[in-house]
Image (spheres, coloured by chain):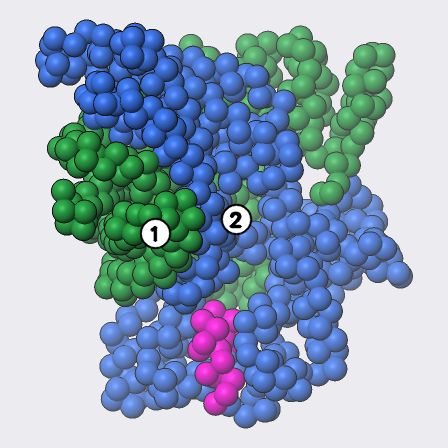
Chain colours: A green, B blue
Amino acid sequence: MAMEIFDRDRLTELLKSRQFRKLRETMAEMNEVDIAEFIEEQEQEAKVLVYRMLPKELAADVFSFLEVEDQEHVINSITDYELGKIIEDLYVDDAVDMLEELPAIVVKRVLRNATPETRALINQFLQYPENSAGSIMTAEYIGLKRNMTVEQAFAYIREHGVDTETIYTCFVTDSKRCLQGVVTVKDLLMNPYETIIRDIMDEHIIYAVTTQDQEEVVETFNKYDLLCLPVVDHEDRLVGIVTVDDVVEVMEQEATEDFEKMAAMLPSEKPYLKTGVFELARNRIPWLLLLMFTSMLTGAILVSYEEALQVVPLLISFIPMLMDTSGNCGNQSSTMVIRGMAVGDIELKDVLKVAWKEFRVGIICGGVLAAANYVRLMIQYPGQPLVCLTIILSLIMTVILAKTIGCILPMVAKRLKLDPAIMAAPLITTIVDACSLMIYFQIACTLLKI
Amino acid sequence: MAMEIFDRDRLTELLKSRQFRKLRETMAEMNEVDIAEFIEEQEQEAKVLVYRMLPKELAADVFSFLEVEDQEHVINSITDYELGKIIEDLYVDDAVDMLEELPAIVVKRVLRNATPETRALINQFLQYPENSAGSIMTAEYIGLKRNMTVEQAFAYIREHGVDTETIYTCFVTDSKRCLQGVVTVKDLLMNPYETIIRDIMDEHIIYAVTTQDQEEVVETFNKYDLLCLPVVDHEDRLVGIVTVDDVVEVMEQEATEDFEKMAAMLPSEKPYLKTGVFELARNRIPWLLLLMFTSMLTGAILVSYEEALQVVPLLISFIPMLMDTSGNCGNQSSTMVIRGMAVGDIELKDVLKVAWKEFRVGIICGGVLAAANYVRLMIQYPGQPLVCLTIILSLIMTVILAKTIGCILPMVAKRLKLDPAIMAAPLITTIVDACSLMIYFQIACTLLKI
């Protein structure tokens, strides 16, 4: 129970009975995330009513946690003056996130009400490529100079800290805004007031470049357990910072993209319930079409062995089992490898180690499945030893093959600079289906002398 | 290029040419993560050699970033005195993580060399249930009293802050260690020295309970964008904190578990390359067996329509296409719903909204696939309009059915308090395979009058 501190019913009660002063006082004590949630639950008019009741130091914080539709609704219902206040109080990354999703006409009004400096900053940020370090960073950080003392640094933080997203890591820059060092508030606290920043700053800076991919930013964060990462432009000038909460969001987004790709879909931009039916269909159809046509190959293989099926009709009843099992086996090993590569546990150079491992896992899994099947076949078809042998041999071979193909293909994709996630269940299934049918019929024709 | 600051070749060079003093000086300037990486790349004996060269204030930090095998190797190669130093310098959560994986005999030696207080703390932490808030928290935090002034608080932090994982959030407790409030270093910096903590602390505390599941801890972190979360026992006493870096690790681990479950595997405890072949096989066989036996049902359906296949042999060639396509469609919608529920975008109450959405997506996808197939069938089998109609009708119906089943089953699982991730590709495929075959043959028998 990560405690819900406030009593939502009580707020609703206060709103309904129009006890606005009390409502306002209660909200002033609340967490901005909870207030945003409360606002989202209200009717359209009540939303703005409640929003305008917020103490002004809370307004921008709550605003940044609202859904984009509600942000738009609020923007359309407040005066230019109020709007200007909100924009100046928002962190640049939150403002940019919002502007990227708002309709053009609303964006214009927002920018018109920003100060020239804020407008310039927002425009600069809007230009960074999607999914780059620049697109997730924020501009508000504490910048110190190397000649300051710890005391001066504290004075500076006291003066400028209120509006920055994190004060705990401070960046030391020279007159050209080039990054020279990093000093944490912990360092400042642990040293006497007269210490010069230059002497305690860490010059071994871990940083990112604006154009770098956000996935690399996430990797750096995880590798070094960071709370924030400075971002520099191509002239080494500090332009912003990425904070850990943005990274957590990116991680979730990247995992979702992998889930989608592995289920043969193009990644979606928005949460499921906000994505239209046509967009959902558009994301799914390309792979469905491709896979449908490749599965026709499997159909063609089936037709080419029609004769065998006519001679021993029983053979047909094992086709779904063989196809499903090999698909599942391939899916298991490809998932392990794709995820292993995504989190950095498996690298390309491990390909032989992985293949050998999966080969052995395949022998064990195939053996166990074959044994279970043997018992069942002996009971169900006691007079058909050769058919039994066909099934069991095919099962073992297809399982081993599926495991091996399933682990190698994602690594091949990676080697070819493709996304390994495309080599997941759907494509692997189609490929191993065809292989397993060929193995099955080949063994059947040989053993049963068809 | 999240800059690799140090030149690894240079370090290797220094080690090889036995310039130990220089090596030591270079490492003293480096990030502990990079040093740990460098150590892991060395031969067994060189590992301990390099490790012992580390300045003592770095030793424990580097140690906590080593792989558990290397930790064991180091422990076995150092004196009891050195070992005692490391243990006291480690954060409790890192020590607990390590002890959970080390062999019993090594654990004994480690505990023997810890001070009684540390030993008691470690033992307490080892008892929290796996995946609970207690199991991921650490004991080192800054605890303040409500009557302190800001100045006293700073003095306290200066004295005790070196050994705590984060100093930026401080916790205010009463004489019984019950949590009363939270104050951040930012709050302290923004207020005059004579301010009393009581007046600036936030009493609306978001916290977790030791026995709470780690997934809920992650949700709370994400919802409120936290940097750390206090953990209390069942008597409301503060026992530890969870920091954001632990949460990032849990997030990655939970996503991996979902990937594994969705590919019909039991979640593994260790990274892929460290998991033995037998353990991998054991994680995969249960689901493979279950799915193998259920797919026999599909085989039985196939057999029961053997007659129809004898009359119109062409029908068999479309079976893989229909089965694969319906499996893929079901997979797509179940993945969207499972992931949507995991990240909180979709809730149980949305079930009708989701089903209606997927039904419409199914119509569009089915329509497009059928149209593409129509063109191909007209070219390939111009004289068989009724067969074509059978295929096309079956395709549309199975796609719609697969989409609808695929989105509803995960929600049913959640309603039954099962993990929705089990209703992913493998199980969905088996279920929709059987359905699609029945639809196909039913339509075929009706249209072709078999």
A385, A66: nearer the viewer:
A385
Q: Residues within 10 Å of mark 1 (few under 14, many from 20)?
A: many
- In 3D space, how far apart are the residues under numbered discs 2 and 1 (Cα atoms)? 19 Å
Q: Residue at x 39, y 21 (%)?
A: B438
- Predominant secondary structure, magenta span: helix
Res. A161 in view: yes
Task: State which chain disc 2 sits on.
Answer: B
Kindly report which numbered mark, 2 or 1, lies closer to the viewer in this rendering.
1
Instruction: Find residue A380 and report its horizontal and vertical position in percent.
Output: 41, 44
On the rendered structure, is A438 left or right of A364? Answer: left
| Residue B437, picture quadrant | top left
Q: Which quadrant holds the C terminus of chain A?
A: top left
Q: Which residue matches tag 1? A: A333
| Residue A323, picture quadrant | top left
| B128 shown above or below A428 | below
Q: Which quadrant holds the N terminus of chain A?
A: top right
Instruction: Find residue A139 and report its horizontal and vertical position in percent.
Output: 45, 39
Instruction: Find residue B406 and report its horizontal and vertical position in percent.
Output: 46, 27
Q: Residue at x 52, y 48 (%)?
A: B254
SS state under label 2 = helix
Q: Which residues are magenta?
A: B60-77
Q: Which residue matches tag 2? A: B254
Three-letter residue code for mark 1 = Ser
SS state under label 1 = helix
